[in-house]
Image: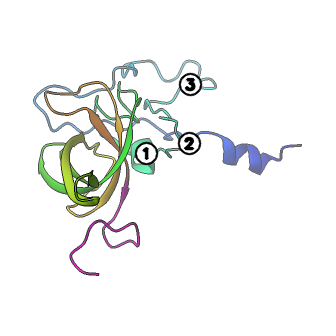
Amino acid sequence: MHTAAHIFATMARVPKEYVECDQNEKAYQKQDAIFVARKRSIAASKAKPMRFIKNVGLGIKTPDTAIEGNYVDKKCPFTGNVSIRGRILTGIVRSTKMNRTIVVRRDYLHYVKKYARYEKRHSNVSAHCSPAFRVASGDTVVIGQCRPLSKTVRFNVLRVTPAGSAGKKGFGTGF
């Protein structure tokens, strides 16, 4: 039998009330799935939440800032019109200079058959970073493949591990 506490814990969290979205662009920012001007007093018992959020799946937890925040990002995998499919990659943030886009460096080893040894190589991947995340250079991120969002961006940030946290090391300079 399920107790009330268990049912409450398994329910999806939704924002309590409607909060006007951040307006810092020239055009009016709103979520496509939400009708802002609806009458709130009619059917209060079955009122839908005033913020569109979704679960991307793959064991990725939706961040609290995506659920309770008031940003609008149509390319966000949690609040926008983007589905994650294909590859899931991990890398280190190299640059955050672009608007809502980061550069992720992926280090790997390439085997050279002639010398029977490995050489270090790397590749840079551009990824869209939702306002739900605070990302700095050196952080470790998990990115998921999605449809092309721009000329070079085909990945979206799903999880961020700050640089100070203990985690997997890259190539490093010392032994």
Decide: is 164 above or below 47: below
Q: Identify the residue at horizontal 41%, vertical 36% (top origin).
A: 78
Q: Mostly what secondary structure, the magenta segment?
A: loop
* 2 or 1: tag closer to the N-terminus: 2
Looking at the figure, which quarter contains the N terminus? top right
Q: Which residue is mark 3?
A: 47
Residue bounds of the magenta highlight: 160-175
Q: Secondary structure at mark 2?
A: loop
Give the quadrant of residue 131: top left
* Magenta residue check for 68: no
Where is mark 2, residue-wise?
13
Could you say where residue 86 lies in the image, as x and y percent from the top left?
A: 40, 30
> Disc 2 to disc 3, how far (Cα)?
14 Å
CA neighbours of label 1 inside 10 A, class few (<14), some (14 to 19), many (20+): some
For disc 1, the marked residue is 68
How far separated are the C-alphas under marks 2 and 1?
Answer: 9 Å
Q: Please identify, in this view, whether the residue under mark 2 or under mark 3 is nearer the observer.
A: 2
In depth, the one of 142 and 28 nearer the eye is 142
- Tell me residue 49's x, y (percent): 50, 30
Q: Are marks 2 and 3 in contact (CB under 8 Å)?
A: no
Q: How many marks?
A: 3
Q: Per the image, is 166 magenta? A: yes
Choose the circle earlier in sequence order: 1 or 3.
3
| First-in-chain label (2 vs 3) | 2
Spot occupied by residue 170 in the image (x, y as percentages of width and height): 30, 65
Q: Nearer the viewer, mark 1 or mark 3?
A: 1
- Give SS at disc 1: helix
**Residue flagged by tag 3: what amino acid is it?**
Ala
